[in-house]
Amino acid sequence: MSANFSTIAILGATSGLGEGFARRFHAEGKTIIATGRRLFRLQSLQRELPGLQIQEMDTSSITTLPTQISQLLTTYPDIDTVITMAGIQKFFTYKDPTSTSMAEIQLEISTNLTAPAVIAHAVIPFFLAQNRPTTFVTVSSGLAFVPAPVFPVYCATKAAIHMLSVSLRAQLHGTNVSVLELAPPYVDTALDMEHREDLVKSQGGEEKAVKPMGLEQYLDAAMERFEAPRSGEVAVGFAEMGAGKWREAFGPILGMMGTKG
């Protein structure tokens, strides 16, 4: 399916999975527009990857996000694929109110859920007006299907992204817009670096703690899945298990409802 990806906007490409996919798709000869809050990181990536286009963008700024997306689509009208990579993960417990704050909860929800929904609102009409195949890629997680209690808001937002993806796919069935849900497992990136020590402790120490998948190993598998998605989810490892069980359990019910999700 990635043969239909020609000009790809990766929203949140300054590190981790976003940067990794920017490198992989760039190596395949795709035109890449990388966005993110940290302009210096984008500029460094641009110097390394000839032809890479960049745009400073803060997807957590919901009030300005429609304008930012409009500027992106105006500047790069050939975009046929958008990947909504930006995300935040917070480790905390509601038993200890000091372990988080209202502002942090709001930011996590805004970044992980509200922003992709707003981006879809701006991008989908643009795609529908194109006379070509287009693709909108959301990013959930294996934790969308089996939550980790130490990430209560993160898991909730990723479960919601899964449902948003199913709904978008159903609404856009039969159009020129495909909807893919990228569902990674636990991958070794900076997403959890600020709380990885606490995460290991919560699992009983180094010997018992779940080990993250290496970034390059994950990218190898995910790029292969992009070529021929087995369902609406581009899922790897633990996430593939969760998505598969969800499809097995709820696929027949979706069929009964006539939902093409």
Image (cartoon, rainbow, N blue to C red):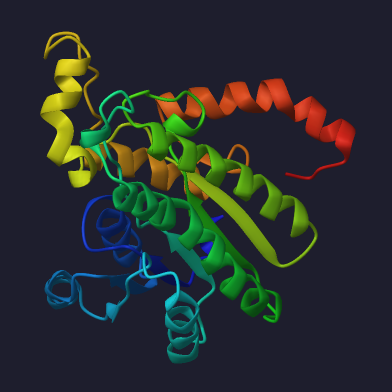
Task: Name the quadrant of the C terminus.
Answer: top right
Is residue 228 in view? no
x and y percentages locating residue 220 in the rendered image = 33, 42
Q: In which quarter of the image is residue 152?
A: top left
How many numbered marks have been drawn onto this rendered protein structure?
Answer: 0
Task: Name the quadrant of the N terminus.
Answer: bottom right
**Please, is residue 68 above or below residue 14 in the view?**
below
Q: Which residue is drawn at 62% across and 26% down?
A: 246
Q: Residue at x 68, y 55 (%)?
A: 168
Q: Residue at x 53, y 37 (%)?
A: 159
* Residue with the most extreme bottom position: 75
x and y percentages locating residue 80 in the rendered image = 54, 73
**Please, is residue 202 above or below residue 224 in the view?**
above
Which of 28/7 is in front? 7
x and y percentages locating residue 15 in the rendered image = 21, 57
**Please, is residue 59 above or below residue 215 in the view?**
below
Which of 229/77 is in front? 77
* Residue with the most extreme front position: 97
